Structures are given as structure tokens and as C-alpha cells.
Image (spheres, rainbow, N blue to C red):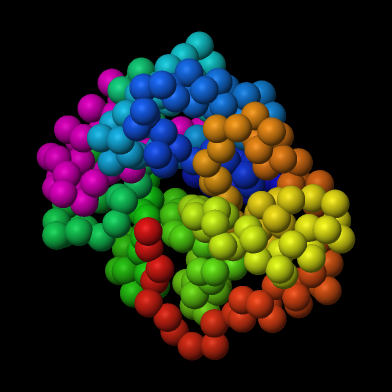
Amino acid sequence: MKMIKLADTNLPAIGQGTWHMGERAGQRGAEIAALRQGLELGMTLIDTAEMYADGGAEDVVGEAIAGQREQVFLTSKVLPSNASRSGVIQACERSLQRLRTDMIDLYLLHWPGQHPLSETIAGFETLREQGKIKAWGVSNFDLDDMQQLPPGCATNQVLYNPESRGIEYDLLPWQQEQGMPVMAYCPLSQGGSLLQHPALRDVAKRHAVTTAQVALAWALRQDGVIAIPKASNPDHLKLNAAVADLQLSDKDFALIDKAFPPPRRKQPLDMV
């Protein structure tokens, strides 16, 4: 699998997202099994957040990684409303309890909020000094936001897929120049119209793969991009892991570009 260096760690370019996990008690067993299967397939980066199911997703992750914490690169996110200097520390403590661990590898500010960034980062640095987080970063930050950050930010997690490619105009090139990986959330969009689009279907048919695999391979064509799709289906997990062997052609990329043109001017940052 393609590897990306993030926070001084070589990580697989495909990780596991957990948005919407922990919302239904009846799905808990399947979600835990899916995360464990993903680890067995080499997708050792797991991304979660205190916001997801009001901590429920972190709780699912904590149970899933019990006994194999050392194999996992764990990412979580703090809500902007909790991102004061002291609030960050308190929120992290709660996340650590739910995750059943004493350290989070990468801790992100979920999106820009009302608290001064200097306070948030001071909280992050305190947590790093205490050994409770290894590195910090941000999510849903546009280029202007990124340029205001002091040194030390490990990544920016943003929406990126063929339907939402505005970051290619300025944000993605800037991060590539900085050697700062992009974590692409919702790389399959919301799964609906994108995966049914004729362009992706044509490419998938040519390679005898699924349209979801095409969308993932499309995102990973960019240097420094890590995709974090959420999957609870064992077959989908295997297909995600297999994307490492999928090589799209210039013809494939041209077809997708025609259907989803790259940005030619600055666009507002997409978020979901």
C-alpha cells in the first residue's frame, strides 16, 4: 500500500473513518468487527472525533483497538466550542477515557471557531508536552486559515472527492509545497450520485473494479493525500484495501476531469 509520512510516522494512504459509528447500539458489534478487520488489512490509521455520536464513535474505537493499541495510529478531533486553552485539555481527557488509551497520535481542531487559535494551540502544546498527544493539526481550514498557523501543524483534514475538488486550486498545492499531508474525508462523497456517475462507471468497468475504488484511486493520485473512507461492510473494507494495486490511466483521469472539471478560480472551502 502507498505510504504517506505524517507526524513522523509512515502511514497507509487509506485509513478508516468513523463518522456515523456509535449511533445505533445494534450496529456496535459490526462496527467493532469492521475496524478490527481494517487493521488486519493494513489500514492502521483510524480517524474519529468527540462530535461523532457525542463520543459514541470514540467509545466504539476504544473497544475495537483494545489489546492492539500499538498497531494503530489514532486521530481524534476537538469541537471548536471546547477549544479554549483549558477546554482542549479537558476535552482530550474525556476522549482518552472513551478511547481507553493514554495517548492520541494526532489531535485536530475540528473546524475554526470562536476561541483564538493561539489558545487552542497552547492547549495542544501542553497536551503534547504531557505526552497525551503526539502531534496536532486542524480540519476544515482554508488557505488563509492555514497561513495564520504557527509551525507545528501536522495536517489539515478537508473534504475532497471528484465532486468537491476546490482545494486543488490553492490549498492542496500549498500543503504539498509545505510537505504537509492532506487527510481527505468523505472521499466517496456521501456515496450516492457520485458512485452512480457514468464517468466513474466507465472507468470502473475498464478496470473491473467498483466506482468506490475508482474514487479512492482518484484521490490518491495526488502526492501527500490520505483518504479516510468509513466502511462497516467486510467486502467494502477488502475493496478499499485493494485500491493500493489500482493504477488509473491518463485516459481515466481525463474522463473524470470532463465530468468533474478541476477548479479554475478560488472557491469557498466545501464542508459537510
Q: Quadrant of residue 78?
A: top left
Give the percent coordinates (x, y) of residue 76. Answer: 37, 38
Quadrant (top left/top right/bottom left/bottom right) for the N terminus: top right
| Magenta stretch bounds | 73-97
Relative to residue 80, is residue 239 drawn left or right? right
Give the percent coordinates (x, y) of residue 55. Answer: 28, 31
Quadrant (top left/top right/bottom left/bottom right) for the C terminus: bottom left
Pick whichever, 231 or 175, lies toward us: 231
Residue lying at 68% horizontally and 42% vertically, measured from the top left = 240
Relative to residue 241, is residue 167 drawn left or right? left
Residue lying at 25% horizontally and 50% vertically, measured from the top left = 121
Q: Is residue 42 visible?
A: no
> In this rendering, is residue 6 above or below 265?
above
Q: Main secondary structure of the magenta part?
A: helix
Q: Quadrant of residue 204?
A: bottom right
Give the percent coordinates (x, y) of residue 119. Answer: 16, 52
Pick whichever, 230 or 174, lies toward us: 230
Pick whichever, 168 or 255, lies toward us: 255
Residue lying at 64% horizontally and 47% vertically, measured from the top left = 13
Give the percent coordinates (x, y) of residue 233. Answer: 60, 32
